[in-house]
Amino acid sequence: MFDLQTLDDLHSLAETVELECKLAQGQDGKGEIPRDFWPTYSAMANAHGGVVLLGVREKNGRFSIAGLENPAKLRADLFNTLNNRTKVSVNLLSDADVEEIRIEDKLILAVRIPAATRQQRPVFLHGQPLGHTWRRLNDGDRQCDEATVKRMLAEQLEDSRDTRILDKFGLDDLDLDSLHAYRNAFAVHRPGHPWIALDDPAFLRMVGGWREDRASGLTGLTAAGLLMFGRWPAIPEVFPLYFVDYQEQTGEPDSPIRWLDRVVPDGSWSGNLYDFFRRVIRKLTADLKVPFALKDGVRIDDTPTHQALREALVNCLIHADYSDRTSVLVVKSPNGFSFRNPGVMRLPVAQALHGGASDCRNRTLHQMFLLINLGERAGSGVPKIRSGWEQEGHGLRLFDSFEPFDHTVLEMTWGASDLVVSTEVAGTGSPIGSPIGSPIGSSKTEDRILKMLRDDPKYSAQQLGDALGISKRAVLKQIEKLKQQGRLSRIGSAKGGHWEVLN
């Protein structure tokens, strides 16, 4: 479960977002689960998971083995508390997640805490989510504020976030030009469809923009209807934090020009998602090269690159959490594209990249785009983006983050995987131009690690993993392999030292 066999392995560790070490000696020195283990359990479960080592002493950034006199007792105490719902909301661990490790005749416990699913979050303590929910940020456990906990609860309870009926909102809150433009697109893609002849209210009902709740009898405009076809300022009345932003940037960090072109809700257009999509997709693809190709005597202008960008934009809009504090941000620069949406991913990144499973946050919006041949069926969107982009030899990276607010970013860069772009994705602290190429079809991972360490010998394993789109554990395995091959050496301590590339 955890690759830790010698003191040298221990000395190479540093507490990170995925690793925490605790002494766990207890007042009598015989060992007990420390009180601060439980906020860490909640924090890691509500983030991306991690490992807690019990029986390890930390001093001035250096780790040493204290050992546990009776690890079996700690294991029993651990599971007793995990299965007590007045103390912990859910037990995520199995026996296989708690491993005894012997290092130089001393035993420690490695506890692997998996990330909780959407249906399990928030993982909280003492029977009360408000005030007792934690999340792992950087190398610390941070108490979640009330708004964050409420969003977790909404995510847990609502499979689709856009179906709710908006009380006292109606057709007057829609931009009819947007709705009619959508209807025209629907008619083009589905000629002869019986919905074409319906009036606006009936058509809106059929596509999910208007709904009746049979249980309550409430009838009205849905959240999806307002987001897709609404007008300003009705949209921010329901979604106060709603903001969509497209920026075309120069790619030059020292340029006095912040952007060459920008699309935001400025009062000159509706501000809704359908109009944002129509405006932005033209700008994203305006200067793409179109090779001369014929099919049945007709020129084909829709390349895999066009398809990938179109799908990426739709994917960004249908997975966004419009109640969250981060805006939708689409960035175009000379070196690539970035698509950021508020809300972290509902599925693990690896699963989303592989495809086959789906948990769309806004299923009605998804269906609306599908009806005009935009977007992909459940579970195939991200794999199609990846396939279309990578087959042209470009780099792709998908990740989510909780800082400064919950968000997901899809980065698509031109050319080689080690291309460096100077533009920073607003609010992520992560440059688009980190060496982000795809793990598939790019140079060997160890060669990319060596290249990065030549450029900056102080990179941590976590930073390498973030830049390469792989886990910290995978980076540590590659580093160990490089050390055994005599290609890499560590100079100094885990926190204060640096890497030396030997060949």
Image (cartoon, grey):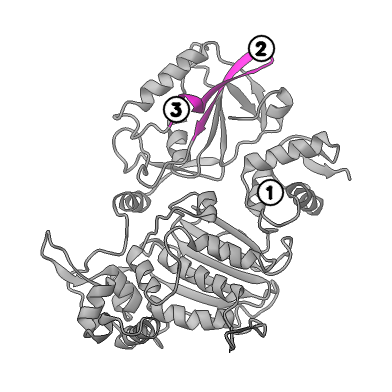
List x then y, in percent, for residue 254: 70, 74
In the rendered view, does 120 fall on the left or right side of 300?
left
Regarding mark 2 in the picture, which secondary structure is present there? loop
Location of the N terminus (image quadrant): top right
- The extreme right residue here reads 503
Regarding mark 3 in the picture, which secondary structure is present there? loop
In the rendered view, does 456 fall on the left or right side of 169?
right
List x then y, in percent, for residue 217: 10, 64
Q: Residues within 10 Å of mark 2 (few under 14, many from 20)?
A: few
The residue to which callout 2 is attached is: 105
The residue to which callout 1 is attached is: 464
The quarter of the displayed image where residue 271 is located: bottom left
The quarter of the displayed image where residue 376 is located: bottom left
Q: Amino acid at mark 2?
A: Asp
Q: Which residues are magenta?
A: 93-113
- In the image, what residue occupies the spot 27% across and 70% down? 208
Q: Amino acid at mark 3?
A: Ser
- In the image, what residue occupies the spot 35% across and 84% down? 191
Regarding mark 1 in the picture, which secondary structure is present there? helix
The first of marks 2 and 1 along the sequence is 2
Q: Amino acid at mark 1?
A: Leu
For the question of whether residue 75 can be seen, the reply is yes
Give the alpha-carbon distance from disc 2 to disc 1, as whole Å. Answer: 33 Å
What number is the disc on residue 343?
Answer: none
Q: Who is closer to the viewer here, 225 or 439?
A: 439
- In the image, what residue occupies the spot 72% across and 64% down? 420
What number is the disc on residue 94?
Answer: 3
Do the residues under discs 3 and 1 have CB atoms within 8 angstroms? no
List x then y, in percent, for residue 269: 40, 86
For the question of whether residue 495 can be seen, the reply is no
